[in-house]
Structures are given as C-alpha cells and as structure tokens.
Image: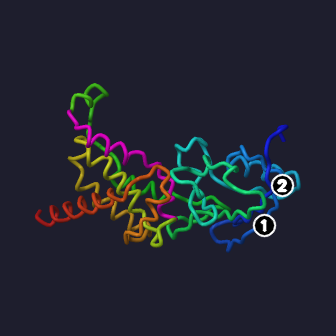
Amino acid sequence: MTQGTETIDITLKVWRQKGPEDRGRFETIEVKDVETHMSFLEMLDVVNERLTLEGKEPIEFDSDCREGICGMCGAVVNGIPHGPEKAMTLCQLHMRKFEDGDTIVVEPLRARAFKVVKDLIVDRSPLDKIIQAGGYISVNVGGAPDANAIPISQELAEKAMDAAACIGCGACVAACPNASAMLFVSAKVSHLTLLPQGKPEAARRAIGMVRAMDACGFGNCSNERECEAVCPKEIKITNIARLNREFIKAALFSMEK
C-alpha cells in the first residue's frame, strides 16, 4: 500500500462458473485495504493475486485496453452493466466511487445470446455475426483524399460519428429486459447509412443485420430505454428509430422487386 493512500474494506460477491454447462454460484470474498485510486479491474487484479497466493482459483474476467475503447470489460456491478457511473466502462470505474464496508455484487452480462465461458467472461461472438451480416462497406471507396472529396454536411457527419462511437461491449443487451441488441445494431446501421459510401448497400445491410440479430437469439426492442441509460458511449435510441425506418424501406423495396 502506498503511504498516505486512502483504503477501504469491501465484501465482493462475485459470480463463479466453471463453464457454459455449470450452474454457477456467487462466492463471497472479503477484500481488505483496497486503495481508492485503483480502477475496478485493478482491484480484481489485486484480488486475483491474493487468491493465487492462497492456492485458490482466480476470477476470470475480460479486459484489453483498459482505456474505455475496446469494450472487452463488460460485467454487471450491483445490477448495472459497467457499474453505477454514467458514460463509463468498467475499466474506467474507480474504487473511490464505493464506500468503506460496501458489498459489491459482480456478475456476467446476462442474455440468452451471451453464453458464459467462465466466471465473468461471456461469449459475445453473436455481435460479430451481426457485423458479418452487413456491418461493413464492400465497395472500393479509395484513400482518404478520395473520401474527403465527397461533400457531407456537418450534421450528418456528426450523427454518423456519434453512432460510430459504439464499442460493441454488450451492455445494452444486458440492461434490456428483452435482451435486445437493437441499440448495437442501430448504431452500426446508422453509422454507415448516414454516409454516402454506405447508401448503395443500405437495404441489404438493414435486412441482413436484423435477420442475424434474430437468428442469434436476441429479443425485440420495446422502448424501455435501459440500453441508452447504461451505454458507456451514450448512443441514443433515435438510432433505433432510424434502423426501423431503414428496415421497413428495405422490406418494401424487396417486395416491389
């Protein structure tokens, strides 16, 4: 412990599950002298070091950049994906947000489409399957100078960039009572549909990604807005309205053919 650093004692109730077929359970771990300047993941690192020294199995969890960019660190803290702080990923959550003596419940993202791999790690490959179904531009758009030669209004550019901020963490799915991936899909569709380069494949993209979402077992949107509330990048549900419009247009166009 660094001299002069404030510390707290917490009780960690963490989900432990050996694999997808295991029933899983909560394990209670008393954690003493947690430095408040630590991030939540750094706290888990310290807990794992102590568990390893005691000859116990460490807690498995996902992380990568630890800068709020990659979306790997998704987990549910006290019932909220990524924890209680708004517009923040789990790796950006610091222990100073908790009080001495707090009990903190940590569990994986819960959704039928997200199978638990081990402990806090879930398989989020269904999101990749949705991207593979249409979340890309397959035309040759040239280099950066060519792209800059296409006039795009500031309003459209800003809307596209706001949607492109989605990091695919899956928090929206875990927060939704229907385990819907509509916010994720709508962000990807909006990002590409708003730009001229994405318009030639807009119809195929909307239909393909929605069908893939349904095939993966995600639920439907019922405008609960929990997804918007927990999104670390503050993706707006207005994107879902845009996705619905693009899907209806694409369906009508295919019927005319």
10 Å neighbourhood of mark 2: few (<14), some, or many (≥20)?
some
Which dot, 2 or 1, sits closer to the camera?
2
Residue 169 within the segment the image draws in magenta = yes
Question: Percent position (x, y) of residue 257?
Answer: 11, 62
164, 218: nearer the viewer: 164
The image quarter in which residue 13 lies: bottom right
* Residue farthest along the bottom direction in this orientation: 23
Number of marks in the rendered image: 2
Q: Amino acid at mark 1?
A: Thr
Disc 2 and disc 1 in contact, CB within 8 angstroms: no
Task: Identify the residue under disc 2.
Answer: 32
Q: Magenta stretch: give its range.
A: 151-174
| Residue at the (78%, 67%) spot, across then down | 28
* Residue farthest along the top direction in this orientation: 145
219, 236: nearer the viewer: 236
Question: Percent position (x, y) of residue 5?
Answer: 80, 41
Q: Which quadrant of the figure contains the N terminus?
A: top right
| Residue at the (79%, 45%) spot, across then down | 6
10 Å neighbourhood of mark 1: few (<14), some, or many (≥20)?
some
Disc 2 is placed on an element classified as: strand
Question: Percent position (x, y) of residue 73?
Answer: 59, 51
Question: Percent position (x, y) of residue 210?
Answer: 33, 63
Q: Which mark is residue 28?
A: 1
The image quarter in which residue 118 lies: bottom right
Q: Seen in the image, is 13 located left or right of residue 69?
A: right
Measured along the vertical axis of the image, is residue 159 above or below residue 76? above
Q: Amino acid at mark 2?
A: Lys
Q: Seen in the image, is 46 located left or right of residue 83?
A: right
Q: CA distance from mark 2 to mark 1?
A: 13 Å
